[in-house]
Image: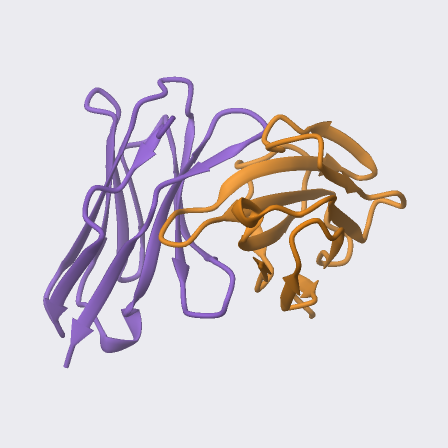
Chain colours: A orange, B purple
């Protein structure tokens, strides 16, 4: 079966532009997570969905970051007025059950965002 | 705040020998720990996990050890193979978010 897919794989944005990053989780997976991975660091949690409900958004760094999963499958992470510090790889992961680390998360390949 | 730390950014091991990757954590609320493996241009891939009620979990060549009193876990790979060369992330969770270490780049030399 297909794994988690993300698009675009690479995105270059000028400072101040808005971007939208898409995640297609594994079909039937209840939980979906977004992470931000800076160069040389591990992934950092941004937000978590259980179906369409965003249960935790404590990791979103500012109100310029917004995520949604309106139908409980595909999710979009939107970053408004991008800044250079937003440059990172954005990883999406899904998990088959509700709850979090009690079931391993399957990661997509990530979207590398570069803000110039 | 770095709640999960991998203090060795890199490790080089000869093929056939044991690789030991270490991880320390600070949050006593973590109750589930995982190791992920990452190749370039790919997302992390789940490798092995351990619940806090256990101190060892083994899966083939991979064994994870958990020392709760020391808040330390380690991943042993034996025997190491060149295909094991990758970045390994330690992760821990206790609620809705998963915390990752910065990763250790393992190189297994033929």
Q: Is residue B7 above or below residue A39?
A: above
* Rendered position, B38 above or below A33: below
Q: Going 66% across and 60% down the picture, which residue do you hit?
A: A13
Residue B34: % across, % down: 40, 43
Q: Is residue B55 visible?
A: yes
- For image coordinates 39% across by 59% down, the residue present is B37
Compare residues B37 and B41 and report the one nearer the observer: B41
Q: Position of residue A20 (x, y in %)?
A: 76, 54
State the image coordinates of residue A15 (x, y, percent, origin top left).
65, 52
Quadrant in which the C terminus of chain B appears: bottom left
Q: Nearer the viewer, residue B57 or B72?
A: B72
- Can see residue A104? no
Q: How many marks?
A: 0
Look at 67% across and 36% down and name the residue there: A48
Q: Quadrant of residue B73?
A: top left
**Residue B31: x and y, percent?**
42, 26
Who is closer to the viewer here, B76 or A4? A4
Question: Which residue is depicted at the point 57% across and 45% down?
Answer: A35
- Residue lying furthest bottom in this view? B110
In the shown orientation, is residue B31 left or right of residue A21? left
**What quarter of the picture does the N terminus of chain B occupy?**
top left
Q: Is residue B96 above or below residue A7?
A: above
> Relative to residue B100, is residue A115 drawn left or right?
right
In this view of the protein, which residue sits in the foreground, B58 or A89? A89
């Amino acid at each position: 079966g297909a794994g988690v897919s993300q698009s675009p794989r690479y995105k270059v944005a000028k400072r101040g532009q808005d971007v939208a990053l898409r995640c297609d989780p594994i079909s039937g997976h209840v939980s979906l997570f977004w992470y931000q991975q800076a160069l040389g660091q591990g992934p950092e949690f941004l937000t978590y969905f259980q179906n369409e409900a965003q249960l935790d958004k404590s990791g979103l760094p500012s109100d310029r970051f917004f995520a949604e999963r309106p139908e409980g499958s595909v999710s979009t992470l939107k970053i408004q007025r991008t800044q250079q510090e937003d440059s990172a790889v954005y990883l999406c992961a899904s998990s088959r059950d509700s709850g979090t680390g009690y079931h391993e998360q399957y990661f997509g390949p990530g979207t590398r965002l570069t803000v110039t | 705040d770095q709640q999960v730390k991998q203090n060795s950014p890199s490790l080089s091991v000869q093929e056939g020998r044991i690789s030991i990757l270490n991880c320390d954590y600070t949050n006593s609320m973590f109750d589930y720990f995982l190791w992920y493996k990452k190749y370039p241009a790919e997302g992390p891939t789940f490798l092995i996990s351990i619940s806090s009620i256990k101190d060892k979990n083994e899966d083939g060549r991979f064994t994870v050890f958990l020392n709760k009193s020391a808040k330390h876990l380690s991943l042993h790979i034996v025997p190491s193979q060149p295909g094991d060369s990758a970045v390994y992330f330690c992760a821990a969770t206790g609620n809705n978010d998963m915390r990752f270490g910065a990763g250790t780049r393992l190189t297994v030399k033929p």
